Image: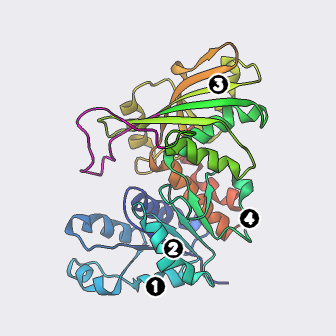
Amino acid sequence: MSRKIVHVVGTGTIGEPLIGLLSDFKDKLGIDEITFHKNSPLTTDRSKVRNLMKRGARLTTHEEKFDGFNSLGLKPEFTTEQAIDRASVVIDCTPKGYGQKNKVDYYEKFLHNTKGFIAQGSEVGFGKMYARGINDEALNIEDDRFIQVVSCNTHNLCTIVKTLALSDGEENLVEGRFNLIRRSNDVSQSNKFIPAPQVGAHGDNVYGTHHAQDAAALFTTLNLDLDLFSSAMITNSQYMHILHFYLKVKEPTSIQKIISKLESNDKIAITDKINSNEVFSFGRDHGHFGRILNQTVVSIPTLNLKNETEITGFCFTPQDGNSLLSSIAATEWFLYNHSYEDKIQCLKPYFYDEV
């Protein structure tokens, strides 16, 4: 039986925690080896690379970069092409645009012996859109060799729509309207921080921002055509994105029914908290290296119901946590197509009922 090797390309805000999570749970996930690609030999990144290697992950890079890493005391074991060629599954976590470039430059050349390739939310068009628990049934092992895990906020938006509207029938949603209140950058990043709240333009006259557009595209993989529209703004905070949602549904409901639906979905956490720093702090203290793996954290005090059919509220996006979960779920789907749901249950301690 061939060894099951997962190769992660990139060590940024998704790549770094993903490499660590895979390394920590590889035995339970049925993975033999984790390798990762680091592009640049930087002294500022030496500590994180060294710690990922201590956790069992094996460093790879471009052949011409070997000397640079060796000078830092970090020994790459495989070249870029060797690492991809050895891998059962490749997960691309590079900055926007690089995933598409890597697909052309590398990934398409290794389809003969690699089960699948996964990219992140910015790489629209890389492959079939995917979010765990939303459109698993749309995946086809014969056709879907390339998968794009949607963005963290798209995970949140889709989970709210599916749980609170579509659970009462595919035709139940009349319309969904959303406002994404985004943090400036990750706590690990020093650039792109803004001095004051900044409103965003609507790039699409049908969907508004990419969040609703991506969510609508994701639901089309289930043959659903939904009326969704989103706006977005950025705040001068590094804590968490926040989603304000408005759903108009056909089937009358109640606040208690809404809460019951939220509680019954193990991918949703509820909270009585209203401050993003408190939710973030819970993840720091109880999550896997700070990560909450739920798709969303819904603030119960903010829920409101008007005319029995208009649902509004706020929820927090667990940043890269939901993208990490979908990336691992897609990886396990490639490796263990018929039992991947069972495999990923080892991560269940980091799905919280309440935050």
* Residue at far front of view: 205
Do callouts 4 and 2 mark residues in contact (Cβ within 8 Å)? Answer: no
* Residue at far top of view: 307
Disc nearest the viewer among 2 and 3 = 2
What x and y, as percent, mark residue 144? 68, 67
State left or right for residue 249 relative to residue 295: right
Residue 232 vertical position relative to residue 312 in the rendered view, above or below: below
For the residue carrying disc 4, how many other residues have a C-alpha within 10 Å: few (<14), some (14-19), or many (20+)? few
Disc nearest the viewer among 2 and 1 = 2
Q: CA distance from mark 4 to mark 2?
A: 20 Å
Badge 2 marks a residue whose secondary structure is: helix
Q: CA distance from mark 1 to mark 4?
A: 27 Å
- How many numbered markers are drawn? 4
What x and y, as percent, mark residue 185? 33, 46
If you read the primary sequence from the N terminus, does the residue marked by circle 3 or circle 1 appear first?
1
Badge 4 marks a residue whose secondary structure is: loop
Report the residue marked by disc 4: 140
Tell me which residue sits at (73%, 56%) in the image: 138
Report the residue marked by disc 1: 81
Residue nearest the viewer, comparing 151 with 38:
151
Q: Is residue 304 magenta?
A: no
Q: Which numbered dot is residue 259?
A: 3
Report the residue marked by disc 2: 103
For the residue carrying disc 3, how many other residues have a C-alpha within 10 Å: few (<14), some (14-19), or many (20+)? some
What x and y, as percent, mark residue 99? 47, 67
What x and y, as percent, mark residue 61? 36, 79
If you read the primary sequence from the N terminus, does the residue marked by circle 1 or circle 4 appear first?
1
Q: CA distance from mark 3 to mark 1?
A: 50 Å
- Magenta part of the chain: 180-203
